[in-house]
Image (tube, rainbow, N blue to C red):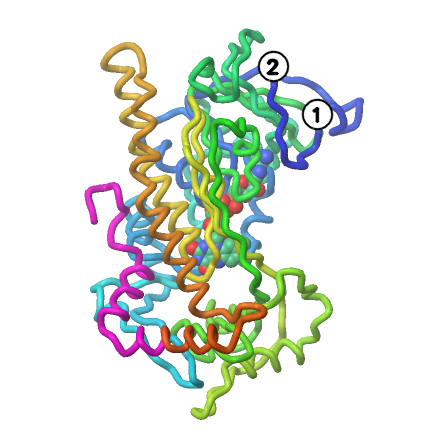
Amino acid sequence: MPVAPAADPTPDLSTSGSPASRRRHAPERTLVGIVGGGPAGLLLSHLLHRSGVDHVVLEARSREEIEHTHRAGILEAGAVQVLVDAGLDRVLRDGSRHDGIVLRFDGADHRIDLTGLTGRSVWLYPQTDVFIDLANQRAADGAYSSGGADGADGSGGVGGVGDVGDQVRWGATVTHVLDGGNVDGGSGGAVGSDSGGDRPGVLWTDRQGDTHELRCDVLVGADGSHSTLRHTLPESQRRTFVHEYPYAWFGVIVETPRSAPELVYTASEHGFALISQRTETHQRLYFQCDPDEDPARWTDDQIWAELQRRVAGPDGFRLVEGAVEERSVLRFRSSVVEPVRHGRMLLAGDAAHTVPPTGAKGLNLALADVVVLHDVLQTWLASGRRTGRRDDTVLDEYGRRVAERVWRAQHFSAWMSGMLHSHPGETDFAARRRLAELRMLVASESGRRFLAEGYTGWGPVLGEGAS
Ligand SMILES: Cc1cc2nc3c(=O)[nH]c(=O)nc-3n(C[C@H](O)[C@H](O)[C@H](O)COP(=O)(O)OP(=O)(O)OC[C@H]3O[C@@H](n4cnc5c(N)ncnc54)[C@H](O)[C@@H]3O)c2cc1C
């Protein structure tokens, strides 16, 4: 059988699992195969389930592991609407609406009144909660009942396709992407290319090292920034636009009450810092650092001293200090892969694009992608019902409809990053110019509105008739 090996360092089939435990299960089929059960993959699963579309999600990690991985915290109003429309309205009760953000420079606060300028707000609602809501809903719908709470227990492959109880499989690592040949090992052809692939598929391993094969009519790569699926696409068929940044964020979760009611984006002569909130007792703080910084070499006292130095000013503002519970360095990268469709394989969320976290766009983009993708898949399936043969050109609509939002978010995230961070080796001229930009921005209603429109996300999901 022709296979395209994944470029990621995922375990090779020839070496995974003990020899005794390694088995190859009979191939399964489904309509939509989804690799990755993060916010993008699980939202797509939820929407497809509501539409009655047969699908399977393969997620390498356990549900518990994802629930405890701290990432994004800010949802645009449009993303909140997406969740509420999908029947997930806990965000309205447990989330916290923010009507403004603060730009802090020259040692003073300059509030951007998001709601006054745009009529829209953002919501502080951690990505972990978005994931928990989706995972709980999928569990309530019985999507992973047969594999136990934690999924691919070696019984993966049990149940037939169309069995809701097997829709989401945790601990299921995709190792190879299969081309469009048929299940019996037919023709070759490039991965997901127009030339062959109307039966894309994957090989995946469960926790016991057993191998499984899943064939589908369409394969969605929602497998994050290190996407296995993206790496299997031939270089000649994809273009990747990349921008690397010479700085990163040192992020900490601290046990303290809030130091400020709204997010504070601080530009200082010592570098950037972001004061954000999580709960009454825990906060999320970041400060700009070198991408190769080792977080383990910092003591708690050093972390607090650095944060206090960045936010200090004549107004005497100080952060409330407490225990540092988690620390990590988050590297910055802007990237866009085009096209997002290759034959019957489509990329969504971080698999298709990444942004630096400054503009709080990554999670929002992932959710917006999925809304459009679900809509396009519906049209594609309907085309088959009407004519007896699905019109694959319909799938191109997905890339066309998400591109505008993706590139707006790329610009916005890069612009905010450049304006707020000190650049290593920056000249005095460049530092003063950045300061002048910040002063002009807050002094101008047009400037503040431009920032507010970008931060709150340009209204409903672009591509859905909004502008
Ligand atoms: C520290 C941090 C802070 C961030 N802050 C923000 C923020 O403030 N605002 C914002 O909007 N965004 C932020 N982001 C970005 C945001 O977290 C991502 O954009 C979001 O997670 C994208 O969702 P996704 O589902 O596309 O990808 P992911 O959440 O990465 O999910 C992909 C899933 O695919 C699985 N997977 C990968 N490979 C395989 C495989 N071979 N087989 C099976 N499964 C596989 C992974 O285990 C993972 O669970 C932040 C990111 C980080 C890391």
Residues 240 and 41: in front is 240
Q: Is residue 34 magenta?
A: no
Type of amino acid at the residue the image marks with label 1: Leu
At numbered mark 1, what does the secondary structure look like: helix, strand or loop? loop
Residues 241 and 416: in front is 241
**294 to the left or right of 440:** right
| Coordinates of residue 313 in the picture (x, y in percent) | 47, 88
Q: Is residue 452 magenta?
A: yes
Quarter-of-image position of residue 340: top left
Which quadrant is home to the N terminus?
A: top right
Q: Can you identify the residue that label 1 sits on? A: 13
Q: Can you identify the residue that label 2 sits on? A: 2
Magenta segment boundaries in residue numbering? 438-467
Tell me which residue sits at (37%, 39%) in the image: 370
**87 to the left or right of 136:** left
Q: In this view, does 86 lie above or below 143?
A: below
| Mark 2 neighbour class, 10 Å CA radius: few under 14, some 14 to 19, many 20 or more | some
Q: Distance between the residues labelled 1 and 2?
A: 14 Å
Quarter-of-image position of residue 62: top right
Tell me which residue sits at (45%, 92%) in the image: 314
Query: Taking the image as drawn, is residue 439 in sight?
Result: yes
The label shown at residue 382 is none
| Coordinates of residue 408 in the picture (x, y in percent) | 33, 51
Residues 181 and 172: in front is 181
